[in-house]
Amino acid sequence: MKRVFGDRKTILILLAPTLVIYVLLKLVPVAWSLGLSFFEGNTLRGFEFVGFSNFTKFFTDPAAIQSLWVSIIFAVLATVGQVVLGYLLALLYVFVLRNGSAFVRTAVFFPMVLPTVAVALLFRNLVSVGSNQGPINAIINFFGGQSVEFLASTIGTMVVALVMTYWSSMGFYAVLLYTGLLDIPDEIIESARLDGASGVRLVRHIVIPLSMPILISSIIFSFNSTLKVFDSLLALNNGGPGTSTSPLTLYMYRTAFQYAEYGYGSTIALMLTLLCLVFTLAVFRSSTRKVDA
Amino acid sequence: MITRRTRHSMLAVGIALATAGTLAACSSGAGSGSSTAGGSAATGKDPSSFTVLTANENPTLAKELDALAANQCKAENKALPLSHQTTAQADVVQKVTLLASQGSLPAHFIAGTAMVRPDGDLGKGKLVLDYKKALTDLGAWDDVLPAASSTVQSVYGQMVSLPYQYNVEGIWYNKEIFSKLGLTPPQTFDDLLADAKKVKDAGYTPFAIDGKDAWPITRLIGMYIFRNVGPDAMKDIQSGKAKLTDAAYVKAATQVQQMAKDGYFGEGFISKDAATANNDFLTGKAAMKYDGSWLLANINDKTQNKIGADSIGLMPFPAVSGGKGSIDQWAANAGAAMAMSTKSYGPKVSAWLKCITQNYGSQALQDAGVISGFKVNKAVTDIPAPTKMVQEKVAGIKQTVLWFEALMDAKSTALAQSNVSLLTTGQMSPQDYMSQLQSSVDANKQ
């Protein structure tokens, strides 16, 4: 067996089909998309080389800049919330509920398996006003308050979108971080306790540093997925009111597929890719420094 | 450490690049569309079936074409069998662009408004059939109602759509509520506002509006503009003769914003969908609803209409005092563009075209109560009262106007509709609304 896998030719023969498929399905389209960024037009009109003009257009396009900010703000707030709530839940599972956490873990994880669009429609109905008054406004009315039309304002829509994201994904991050916490040897916790560390001090000085690698992975995972948020904001309020909660992905979709500007759409996709890359590298740099120290 | 970092970086880069990959995968397959010569005589080549691409949202059309295939167009169907393809309305532009670029457009297909105009992607490539010439050659041009053909030509710049629907738009009102409050259909916009106030004070919602779709609100802005500036108001914007930032245009946005502020659209109208708004009107919660004659399908449905067919009236958008438009100019449209491919316009397809033109009018009216832009060549019986009322109104129309976004490009249309929620909730001023829209119209002028 060792001899077979030690042979370079065998390795190449075994890997080649997968590699070819990967290159054809992943790398070629990516390269194609990169190339399209320098063109304008669509499949019917034909494509025209426009150099860097799509990139200049991106930085002078108020709608693109607005969408960029929506993506960044949403990603930062969603990541912070998801990871913090997930971490608190994980601590709850490990230190409070201990072996009896299975039911709570399953219950909190459950919304993760629901389709995002269904969750968005659910939240839309929860906060609706008027003839189809939702339970949130019914509660507000019960306590004597005026109905609030959450989806009529940017902040309202953003708040609903974030609560929805936290609700549906914190269970996932809780499970992810929970596995990280389980890896911390009991002896270390015990000896820290014997040394007098307990409660917040134990978490701050022992648990967090030891679970840092999985925490960093969670942050990167969360940021990369929330930066590409699309379906939830589309289904919740169609990126509205106006275009004030329209993220970069939605703007890319509309540009490419509704306005048939494939070149500019590809440019927006590229900018999003770069944003994910820059952030991921930034988190890595800061984290490796911390972990090394 | 470095190895782990590199591996993780690569994973992250991979995840990130997937976004770009998705887009590229969908947009690859370049190549310019084949451009066959335009014209209408059956110069194309018949395909193997008469494939019709329609929108999922309009099942009536496919159903009525099936009925024609089984009856009046039996011979045509035998020669070239009818088959259907459907797509979501929102995906029409993308799908048709792709099909056209591959040279595989169906014989008869739905298309985006801008695509079939003379300067649009399909119009420029002469990929769509000129029905006026084709139907004149077939001796069936008289079967298209002049009002419908004039509407089609003013929207698309050429006769490239079959008028499967002929819709007039106006304000549907609840006669019972009106008579209870001693109101008559208002003749001026000021009267309309005064009536709306009385309706609101009596505890009803003055206007049932589905703000989620946005267009019912932009229609009000458009109608005010047509009444105030005149029937050519939006053509003047297109030609650059006027600007949306001119006082007369901004006033329309101001008026509609004020209507929303005064609570005339009811609570929660911004996120209300069409079904809820229809329900509000058809159960007597709202006194009025601006909508097209396609609402007849809901009005004629007894399970939806709880106030009774006789209690519903239709009035035109009222005049604006001192304005150049008139209350007699109804807003009209002829449904989504239904074009034919010049490439597959062979003798058998042209036989289908002739048969549809001669029979669709009576078939759709008899079977579905749909008023089309085709002549009704066969006596139709048992027409529901509301449909009859609309028919009579349509017969008396001398001049029509389009709708607010009819001549705008796709981007400006989307902007007009997405920003209207900001306008009506007071988060955007009427000036900003109109100036953003004007900038978009200017930027997208080719």
Image (cartoon, coloured by chain):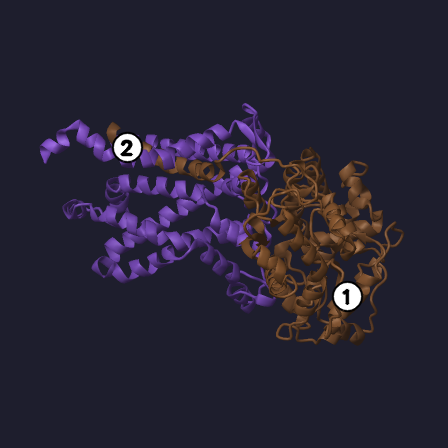
Residue B259 found in image quarter: bottom right
Q: Quadrant of the N terminus of chain A?
A: top left
Q: Are marks 2 and 1 on the same chain?
A: yes
> Which residue in the protein does label 1 denote?
B390
Few, some or many residues within 10 Å of mark 2 (<14, 14–19, 20+): few
User: Is A25 or B343 nearer to us in this picture?
Assistant: B343
The letter of the brown chain is B
Residue A46 pos. (x, y %): 57, 32
| Residue B84 coordinates in the image, percent (x, y) | 55, 56
Numbered mark located on residue B7 in the image: 2
Q: Nearer the viewer, residue B217 or A10?
A: A10
Q: Name the amino acid type tagged 1.
A: Val
Q: The residue tagged with tag 2: helix, strand or loop? A: helix
Circle 1 Cα neighbour tier, 10 Å, few/some/many (<14 / 14–19 / ≥20): some
Q: Amino acid at mark 2?
A: Arg
Q: Chain of mark 2?
A: B
Task: Residue B139: give x, y in percent of width and height.
Answer: 76, 53
Above or below residue A244? Residue A95 is below
Q: Quadrant of residue B200?
A: bottom right
